[in-house]
Amino acid sequence: MLITLFNSLKTNTQGILYAILASLLYAFLPVFTKKMLVTGMSPENLLFWRFLGASLFGISFLTKDFFRLLKIEWIKICLVSFYFIISSYYYVISAEKIGIGLSISVLFTYPAVLVFINRVFLKTNITGTQYWSVLLAILSVYLFTLGEFSSEDILLQGVIYALIASVGYAMYIYGTKEFLMKPMELTFCVCFLSGVFFAITSGFGGDFQFLTYEMLWDEIILSSVCTIGPLYYFIKAVQKIGTVKTSLISAVEPAFTVFLGMLFFDEKLSLMQWTGFIALSIMLYLSMMPQRSKINLL
């Protein structure tokens, strides 16, 4: 009955619901990531197990059409996976250095990055509200670097890593719109290729580690609830309402993650960082407003 009701909704409404669900599931990813890092597991090893598990969950969704993909499609998949790998790796490094709340806040400047990507590749104009959103994104990142931290160098490094993750994530989102294949099949490809990459890097790095029984359940949740679920619903949302709108609806995630960071890991933000978080929230709100005036910056 619920499926019938959902299918009767307008495409735009379905896309919005997909985006909200993806955000809620994805908000728990930093929590379980931090739990695994606390055990001493390396970022590469953690990401290998995460994507291996996600691939095992996703393989059951493959169809016969998947094995008929053209060579050009595989090239596109590899490119999109590369951006996803960059984003995943540098986000984990950032979270390890500066905590999940601050790192996710910097990561969520990616809608501003998407504005420029759409301008460069699609030749779209930058609207008035998007222009102010970009300025607020820059301001928020600057304020995030002004917090009270054990080492200013570590704080700056963590913010820079999160910015790299933000650019990688924006490129990944942009790339997913170019695919006509089923969302779960694309999700499987991205997770499988990411798993292979991190298996190689963790193996050559000499820090490969097997999961203990205590780690296993956290890893299962990390792979299924926090990886396959959000990726699948995010791609569904992108295909129904586009990249920018999907990204902006995801604005609920950083606030939730900041709260979870304080709840589970006793993370704190300084006054200036809270100001940066408020600037980020205003940026996301402005970006969701109807676009009217246009400013051609390029």
Image: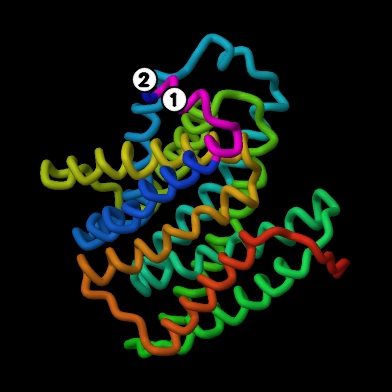
Q: Which residue: 22% across, 43% down? A: 210
> In this orientation, does residue 78 appear?
no
Q: Which residue: 37% across, 34% down? A: 54
For mark 1, give the secondary structure.
helix
From the viewer's perspective, is 62 left or right of 215?
Answer: right
Does 222 appear above or below 30?
above
Check disc 1 and report the residue beneath it: 5
Screen quadrant of the N terminus: top left
From the viewer's perspective, is 165 left or right of 72?
Answer: left
Q: Are marks 1 and 2 in contact (CB under 8 Å)?
A: yes
Categorize mark 2 by other alpha carbons within 10 Å: few (<14), some (14-19), many (20+): few
From the viewer's perspective, is 178 left or right of 283?
Answer: right
Taking the view exactly as shown, the residue that stands out farthest to the left is 213
Categorize mark 1 by other alpha carbons within 10 Å: few (<14), some (14-19), many (20+): few
Q: Quadrant of residue 52?
A: top left
The stretch in magenta equals 3-15
Please state which of residues 259 and 215 is positioned toward the viewer in this rendering: 259
- Identify the amino acid type marked 2: Met
How far from the left and from the top, in percent, is residue 207?
30, 53
Check disc 2 and report the residue beneath it: 1
